[in-house]
Image (cartoon, coloured by chain):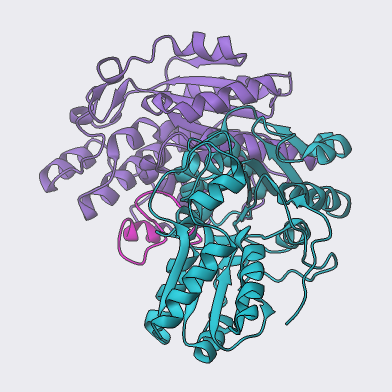
Amino acid sequence: MKKYTDSGKKDTRSGFGDGLTELGKKNKDVVALCADLTGSLKMDDFKKNHPERFFQVGIAEANMIGMAAGMTIGGKIPFTGTFANFSTGRVYDQIRQSVAYSGKNVKICASHAGLTLGEDGATHQILEDIGLMKMLPGMTVINTCDYNQTKAATIAIADYEGPVYLRFGRPKVANFTPEDQNFQIGKAVQLQEGTDVTIIATGHLVWEALQAAETLNEKGIKADVINIHTIKPLDDDAILKSVKKTGCVVTAEEHNFLGGLGESVARLLSTQHPAPQEFIATQDTFGESGTPEQLMEKYGLNASAIVNAVNRVIARK
Amino acid sequence: MADYKALEDLVIQVRRDILRQVHKVNSGHPGGSLGCAEFFVALYNEIMERKDSFAMDGKDEDIFFLSNGHISPVFYSVLARSGYFPVEELNTFRLLNSRLQGHPTTHEGLPGVRIASGSLGQGISAAIGAALAKKLNNDNHIVYALCGDGELQEGQNWEAIMYAAGNSVDNLIVTVDLNGQQIDGSTDNVLPLGNVRAKFEAFGWDVLDIKEGNDLKAIIPGMQKAKERTGNGKPVCVLLHTVMGNGVDFMMHTHDWHGKAPNDEQLENALSQNPVTLGDY
C-alpha cells in the first residue's frame, strides 16, 4: 500500500491564488476578475503584481461573467473568482449563453464549494454546482483535492483553450499530492491499487478515501483508490479498468448525489460495465451552519462513511 | 460625405431581406429589425472602422455586439450585404443546419458574430470586456453595442452600466433602440423605463439622443458625434428613437409585429412599399 503524508494542512483556495500568481508572471494574457471577494479567493497577490490585469467588478457576478466572455475576444484568458454558489447558480444563463454556447475561453474559478464552507450555512454551501456545470455542452469541470493539485490545475487550465469550471474550497485540508505534479485535464490519478473495491473520489473526499482505504486494508480489504479531479471529461478508461478488476464501486464527493460525480460514474458503468455502486454524497438536501468537520460527519461525507459504503457495496457483489 | 442615395437603397433592400427571411420560415422578429435597418446600414457603412474579412479577435478594428439578438434578420442582412458571407445564405435563416440561427451565435461559425445573444441583457457586459481587452492591447478602436429598450429591464445591464462608468470604459458606445415597444405591449405598460437619459447620466455616462432614429441624415452625424465623445473618460450612450416596423405602414407604431411573420398577402403589400433596389437574394 502506498503511503501518503500530509505535508501540512493548507486550503485549496490558496492553491488557486498561488497558481494565479505564477500565471501572472508567465502569461501576459491571463487576466483576473473578482466580485468583491479578493481576499477570500486569495487573489491579492495577482492584484498587487498586475493591477492593470485585475478587474474588481463589485458584487455583480452576471456582469463579471459577461465581461470575461468579452475579454476572450481580445485574446485574454480571464479567470473569474467568487464563491461557487455565485459562480454558477447565480449566473447560470450568463455562463450558458455568453461562455459555453459562445465557446469562450473563460476559467470560472469557484471557492467555498460544498458543506465545508461551514458556518455561513446553506445559502452559501452550493451542492449542485458540479451538476449545473457538467450539463453545459463543452464545459470542462474540475474539482481538485488539495493545495498542490489546485495550484497545478490553475496553471494547467490556462494552456487549455475552452471554458473551464474549477471548483475548490475554503478550509485547510491535508496537502498530500506532489508539489511538482503534472496536472493533466481529464486524466484520473490512481492513488492505491486494490482488487476488492474501487473508490472514486473527488475534491476534499479524496483524502478521506485514502484514510478509508487504510482502515479497510487493516481488515484485509484491498481498495483501488482513484482521484477524479476532472469530472468532465471523465476518464472512462481508468474507471472501467478498475471496476472490471474490482467488480464494485463507491463514489465520494462533497455534492448532491443528483448531478454529481457519482451519477457520471453510474452512467458510464450502466452503459459499459454494470456493477454495484454506493454513493457518498449529500442526499438531495441543503446544508446548514456548523464547522466543516461537524457537517461532513452529519451528512456522511468522511472516511468512516466511505468504509461503511464499501462494506455495503462488497456485500452486493 | 455619405452617399445617401446609395445608403437609402441599401436600407430598402435590407427591409426586403428582413421581410423575406421571416416570411419564408413563418417566424422571427421583423418589428425591431425594421426599426433598426437605418442604424445598421449607417453603422456598417459609415461609422465603424472595420476590416473586410472577419477575424474573431477584431484586432485593430471597431467591433459590434448585438445584445437584443432577436433582431437577427437585420443583423444577418447587413452582415451579408457588408460582405461577411454570401447574401444567398439569407435563404437559410432559421432552417435546420443553418449558420443563421434564430438568434445569432458563434456556435455555427457565422462570420460577423462574436458572441451568442438572445437571452437578453448580456451584450453590454461582453462589450465592456472586449473594450477593456482593446485597452490592454493598446488597440485604439471602438466597441459598439446595441440593446433594446425593453431589454433594459434585465438587471445585468445596470451592473454593466455601473461598471463601465465607474471604470472609465470610454472606448465604448452603447446604443439603446428606444422604440417604446416590447412583446406584451408598450414599455410604459409592461414595466416603465422612466427617464432613460437621466438614468444613464446618473450612472455617469455621456448620453446623446438621436431623435430621428430612422433617418440616415440624423443617424450618421449623431453616431459621428458619439465617436468624437469617446476617449474622454466616460462610456457613451446613444438613445436612438426609432419606430418599430419602420418602412412598412401596417407594421409601424405597434408591438404586434415584434415576433410575428407576415403571411403571403401581407408580404406582398410590405414588399410593394419597398421596391427592389440592389436585388433580392
In magenta segment, residue A286: no
Question: Could you say which is closer to the camera, residue B83 or residue B208?
Answer: B208
Question: Could you say which is closer to the camera, residue A101 or residue B18?
Answer: A101
Location of the N terminus of chain A (image quadrant) = bottom right
Q: Which residues are magenta?
A: B88-109
Residue B265 image offset from top left, x and y in percent: 11, 44
Chain coloured purple: B
In magenta segment, residue B106: yes
Residue A63 image offset from top left, x and y in percent: 56, 34
Q: Is residue B114 visible?
A: no
Q: Is residue B249 visible?
A: yes
- Asked if residue B70 is positioned above or below residue B195 in the image, the reply reads below
On the image, which quarter does residue B181 sit in? top left
- Residue at image point 42% right, 41% down: B10
- Residue at image point 59% right, 33% down: B47
Q: Residue furthest front?
A: A219
- Asked if residue A66 is positioned above or below residue A147 in the image, the reply reads above
Chain coloured cyan: A
Residue B116 image offset from top left, x and y in percent: 48, 49
**Horizontally, is A158 left or right of B8 in the view?**
right
